[in-house]
Image (cartoon, grey):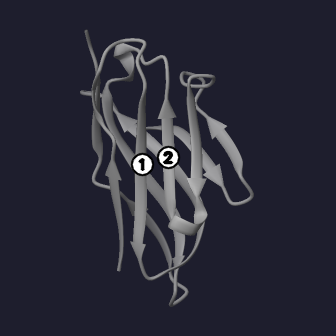
Amino acid sequence: QVQLVESGGGLVQPGGSLRLSCAASGSIFSIERMSWHCQAPGKERELVATIFKGDIKKYAASVKDRFTISSDNAKNTVYLQMNSLKPEDTAVYYCNMELYTDRGNALDAWGQGTLVTVSS
């Protein structure tokens, strides 16, 4: 069984910063891709940033140059550094990992979500 646990959300003023973390635990053999998604009230969940094996990174146009995705592979952890936050960044942020378990099963795992609120 694999579990993803996120942390780091909260209330921040416009222009501020937050750092989200997501740690995976359980019977993990390898992680192929780590992503962050967000879902604002009344909207569909959308992709924010992805980091692939080999440290290839991709970002949504709306967050490029403001957000940075990184990982600590030894800790099975992915981070999202969010700078210059705007009210429209307010959403629940979800961690997502494409991984293989130690039994060779492919798994698309999700965290429970962490709320980020950008407001003065």
Instruction: Name the residue tied to disc 2.
Output: 79
Badge 1 marks a residue whose secondary structure is strand
Q: Residue at x 57, y 41 (%)?
A: 69
Q: Percent x, y for residue 47?
A: 49, 39
Badge 2 marks a residue whose secondary structure is strand
Q: Is residue 50 above or below residue 72?
A: above
Q: Is residue 56 above or below residue 91?
A: below
Compared across the picture, whether 54 is left or right of 63 comes to right
Q: Nearer the viewer, residue 104 or 75?
A: 75
Q: Amino acid at mark 2?
A: Tyr
The image quadrant where one finds the C terminus is top left
Q: Residue at x 54, y 21 (%)?
A: 62
Q: Percent x, y for residue 104?
A: 55, 86
Picture disc at residue 35: none
Q: Amino acid at mark 1?
A: Ser
Picture disc at residue 21: 1
Q: How many marks?
A: 2
CA distance separating discs 2 and 1: 5 Å
Query: Mark 2, residues whose alpha carbon is within 10 Å: few (<14), some, or many (≥20)?
Result: many
The image quadrant where one finds the N terminus is bottom left
Give the farthest residue toward the top.
120
Q: Are marks 2 and 1 in contact (CB under 8 Å)?
A: yes
Query: Mark 1, residues whose alpha carbon is within 10 Å: few (<14), some, or many (≥20)?
Result: many
Q: Residue at x 40, y 18 (%)?
A: 16
